Image (cartoon, rainbow, N blue to C red):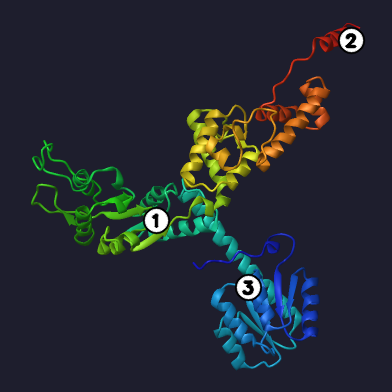
């Protein structure tokens, strides 16, 4: 299914749709603006083809009304330019020079309909409403299918960003095939999760998924692990053993960090891909297998090929279909959903902070969440998962403060972890430190004014007592005891 352009934000909220009118005649533009505005549409106007093309390039519209004959650029030229980059936005051609030939040519170039001047207002409005409604329904169905697929088909792959949705679309498309797939991406982006999703949604799902960490095994041991060996094949081979390829027959074998395997193993792997057979170490017997191969790497295999470190023929055999995973810094809109997912995962493991539905009650305070959104995440999703797991273990209440973060994350955000409470701010203090310092001083001032009564201080600050207590803990404010004189005075007042 082709990509459906996201409708402008206004079309999903307060107005019926956003329409661009491109016409060189001022009275035509004004009459269309009045007609469409009265029907609840938001209307933009362009006085010529160049202006119309520029506005179309700057933002999305639900529909375009385009004049065929304009002095600077014809409507046909604008139509061609728009359709070269956008096949989805509906375009209605309007012209005083109506002819069957012009209508046919416009429709061939991608126009959705054609209206001669003077047009029938009622018919025009009916067709505009129909077209926008159809487009919105198609958009909603497409994203509903994506959401259902994401929720029910890939439960451990979290992401609603466009880049991750495209990855999931590709996974769903290639999973049923027999093709070899190369999954690329930085460390921690979830390459093995993608490989498992491909296997789980393939006809091989009832057979084994066998992962091989290519980089952690010495080359001689890797060959024995992959292809097996017979008794006596080498000194420590006291008995025959099946290799992963034989174990994974009819299933899937996944090579993690494929770029680390040596030349001899590369040659044998190429033969398995081409001939679907191999020989165990020390044996003359050829074993036939039916195994789908998935591979992953955070290296640039093309560069390794150019450097003579990776076989070119093997590279092309592996790279039949490439799935490139985006780093977390390029899909930060997924961070809140990932945080919620990992909160629930580790709350269940630690049996703490769970609601009646067995979901996490934890959430980060706003300052902490902002740090997560601003961080560059060099370790990607794996680094985020570690941060959330640590937070679950250290959390004392449902609102998780930023002081549970590891030092490196705070320092990367410009927050010093060892500055003493109440000490002067350094000249290069971060915004977080400046805000926290001001907040600390205000709270301490109100506590002193109320003789360190947290209840009275909360009332004077117009915040709940629980919020004040959270801030006192986060800002390391030491609560002082009330003075003896004040306690005596209170005691006397109570006796009176």
Q: Is residue 26 above or below residue 175?
A: below
SS for tag 1? strand
Nearest to the observer: residue 422 or residue 139: 422
**Which residue is drawn at the image coordinates 63% and 73% (left, top)?**
57
Upstream in sequence: badge 3 or badge 2: 3
Question: What distance separates the C-alpha of mark 1 from that of mark 2?
Answer: 74 Å
Q: Position of residue 294 (x, y in %)?
A: 32, 54
Left or right of 156, for residue 374? right
Occupied quadrant, residue 271:
bottom left
Which residue is identified by label 2? 493
Which residue is identified by label 3? 57
Q: Is residue 49 above or below residue 408?
A: below
Q: Is residue 169 above or below residue 92?
A: above
In this rendering, does residue 285 appear at all?
yes
Upstream in sequence: badge 1 or badge 2: 1
Q: Is residue 325 above or below residue 155?
A: below
Quarter that holds the C terminus: top right
SS for tag 3? helix
**Which residue is drawn at the image coordinates 10% and 38% (left, top)?**
235
SS for tag 2? helix
Left or right of 249, for residue 419? right
Within 10 Å of disc 3 (Cα), the crowding (few <14, some 14-19, many 20+) is few
In this rendering, does residue 209 appear at all?
no
Which residue is identified by label 1? 184
């Amino acid at each position: 299914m082709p990509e459906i352009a996201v409708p402008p934000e206004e079309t999903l909220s307060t107005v019926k749709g956003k329409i661009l009118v491109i016409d060189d005649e001022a009275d035509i533009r004004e009459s269309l603006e009045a007609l469409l505005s009265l029907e609840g549409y938001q209307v933009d106007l362009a006085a010529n083809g160049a202006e119309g093309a520029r506005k179309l390039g700057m933002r999305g519209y639900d529909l375009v009304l385009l004049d065929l004959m304009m002095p600077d650029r014809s409507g046909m030229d604008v139509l061609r330019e728009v359709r070269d980059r956008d096949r989805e936005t509906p375009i209605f051609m309007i012209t005083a020079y109506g002819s069957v030939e012009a209508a046919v040519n416009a429709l061939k170039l991608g126009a959705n309909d054609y209206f001669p001047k003077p047009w029938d207002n009622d018919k025009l409005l009916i067709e505009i409403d129909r077209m926008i409604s159809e487009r919105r329904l198609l958009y909603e169905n497409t994203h509903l299918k994506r959401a259902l697929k994401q929720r029910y088909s890939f439960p451990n792959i979290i992401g609603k960003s466009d880049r991750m949705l495209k990855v999931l679309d590709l996974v769903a498309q290639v999973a049923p095939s027999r093709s070899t797939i190369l999954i690329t991406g930085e460390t921690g982006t979830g390459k093995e999760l993608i490989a498992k999703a491909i296997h789980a949604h393939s006809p091989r799902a009832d057979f084994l998924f066998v992962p091989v960490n290519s980089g952690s095994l010495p080359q001689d041991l890797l060959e024995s692990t992959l292809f097996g060996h017979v008794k006596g094949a080498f000194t420590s081979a006291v008995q025959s053993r099946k290799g992963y390829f034989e174990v994974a027959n009819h299933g899937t074998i996944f090579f993690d960090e494929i770029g680390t395997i040596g030349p001899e193993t590369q040659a044998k792997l190429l033969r398995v891909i081409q001939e679907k057979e191999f020989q165990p170490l020390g044996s003359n017997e050829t074993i036939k297998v039916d195994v789908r191969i998935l591979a992953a790497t955070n290296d640039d295999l093309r560069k390794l090929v150019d450097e003579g470190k990776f076989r070119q023929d093997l590279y092309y055999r592996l790279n039949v279909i490439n799935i490139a995973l985006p780093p977390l810094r390029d899909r930060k809109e997924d961070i809140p959903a990932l945080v919620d997912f990992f909160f629930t995962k580790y709350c269940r493991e630690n049996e703490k902070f769970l609601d009646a539905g067995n979901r996490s009650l934890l959430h980060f305070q706003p300052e902490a969440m902002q740090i997560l959104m601003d961080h560059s995440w060099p370790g990607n999703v794996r680094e985020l998962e570690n941060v959330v797991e640590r937070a679950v273990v250290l959390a004392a209440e449902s609102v998780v403060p930023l002081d549970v973060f590891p030092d490196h994350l705070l320092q990367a955000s410009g927050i010093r972890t060892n500055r003493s409470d109440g000490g002067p701010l350094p000249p290069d203090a971060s915004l977080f430190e400046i805000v926290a310092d001001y907040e600390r001083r205000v709270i301490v001032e109100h506590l002193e004014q109320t003789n360190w009564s947290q209840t009275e201080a909360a009332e004077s600050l117009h915040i709940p007592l629980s919020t004040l207590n959270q801030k006192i803990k986060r800002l390391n404010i030491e609560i002082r005891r009330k003075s003896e004189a004040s306690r005596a005075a209170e005691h006397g007042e109570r006796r009176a």
